[in-house]
Image (cartoon, rainbow, N blue to C red):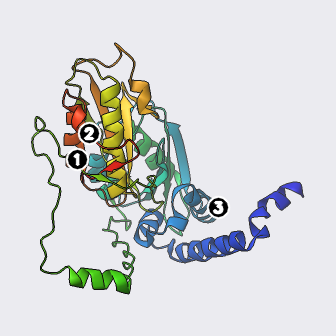
Amino acid sequence: MANETANLEALATRAGFNSVVRYVKKAIEVIEESETNNVADLLSELGDEDLSGDRVGPILNILLVDKLKYKTVSANLRSTAADAVSLAKEFEKWNAVDLVVSYHHPELGLLIANPKNPEGLAGFGSLRKRELLVVYAGKGKAPADDMCQKSAELAVSLFEGAKVKAPPAFLKGNFKARAPKKAKAPAPPRAPKAEARAKSAGKGRAVSAVHPVKEAHRVAPPVVTAGAPPAVVPAGSVKMTPRYAVVVQNELFHNGNVEAWKRIINSYNAKHPELQVYIYYEGERILDINSLFKWGKVKHGSAIEFAVAGIDIKDVAKLQRYLAQGASHQFEAFLRGPISSVLRLF
């Protein structure tokens, strides 16, 4: 009885009750179409933050395990395929089974994809060793069989980089890959009347802009603006770029370089508050950039990596140029202006 009460705690407030009702309504919409459509494709087409991240876990269990009785195989990856996206070409041939893959990304949380869709696998980014991967295999409303179990096992082997050949029986069936529909983008909010009038009054006037530095050896002309809000990654169809390496050109990556990077990333977040920048060094995620400031640790020629996560990822090349400049002896260009201010670089 105590466990049942704990499960109902979300209903104790109006906000919690409304959130649960919205979740259930959207889940029912997916359930009604799950017998004839791939669940990962359905969720991708909805593009709803209420049905993403950790919130999608219960839906996978309700639909694929409890209702449709799909076979499941899970593994903490012992190794990973060099290019997981290319595996979609192999999975596209498996017309005999319906497949859904979930991956517990260390930064983005629970991600799901139809492995027959290369765009879906691209959303996983680089799969990491020892992270949890689960493959669901079934035949829609038809009972799952031994072929489903075998296909799930082979799928995990492919994700771990093994070279396997699918039996001919995998190639015949009606579960063919299809391109999922694009999720509808929300309509942009209307500009307030005062803002509209200001825009109208500004027509015909010259507008100054800060131009990016096109070469790494040139010094950026930073412009100081108001403080930036903290970066928030939305819970929709979040994707992550590959990791990009920035080679340290200074003798050491010292405190000045660290402060330059902090201000560059802060400027990026001010322009794109819906995106998040992740920093890595020697394969490990750096939660505090200040930890890179250790004399003798990050030297000339060392590579610091970064990646960007979000829905509509932009200005990555520009960010990479600025970070390269911030890791060189020209870092001082990013230290101008009050410490609490934000550089307008993007």
For residue 206, which quarter of the picture? Answer: bottom left
Front-most of 257 and 274? 257
In the image, residue 197 sits, relative to residue 102, either above or below, namely below
Count residues near mark 1 (Cα–Cα under 10 Å), then give few for <14, some for 14-19, many for 20+: many
Residue 334 - label: 2
Label 2 residue SS = helix
Q: Is residue 157 visible?
A: yes
Q: Assign the N terminus to one quadrant of the image.
A: bottom right
Q: Position of residue 40 (x, y in %)?
A: 45, 62
Which amino acid type is marked by label 1? Pro
What residue appears at the point 77 percent right and 60 percent down from the top-left corner? 7
Lateral position of residue 234 relative to residue 314, left or right: right
Q: Position of residue 114 (x, y in %)?
A: 40, 58
Disc 1 versus disc 3: distance between alpha carbons?
56 Å
Label 1 residue SS = loop
Q: Position of residue 103 (x, y in %)?
A: 47, 47
Label 3 residue SS = helix
Disc 2 versus disc 3: distance between alpha carbons?
55 Å
Residue placed under numbered mark 3 in the picture: 66
Residue placed under numbered mark 1 in the picture: 222
What residue appears at the point 34 percent right and 73 percent down from the top-left corner? 181
For residue 55, which quarter of the picture? Answer: bottom right
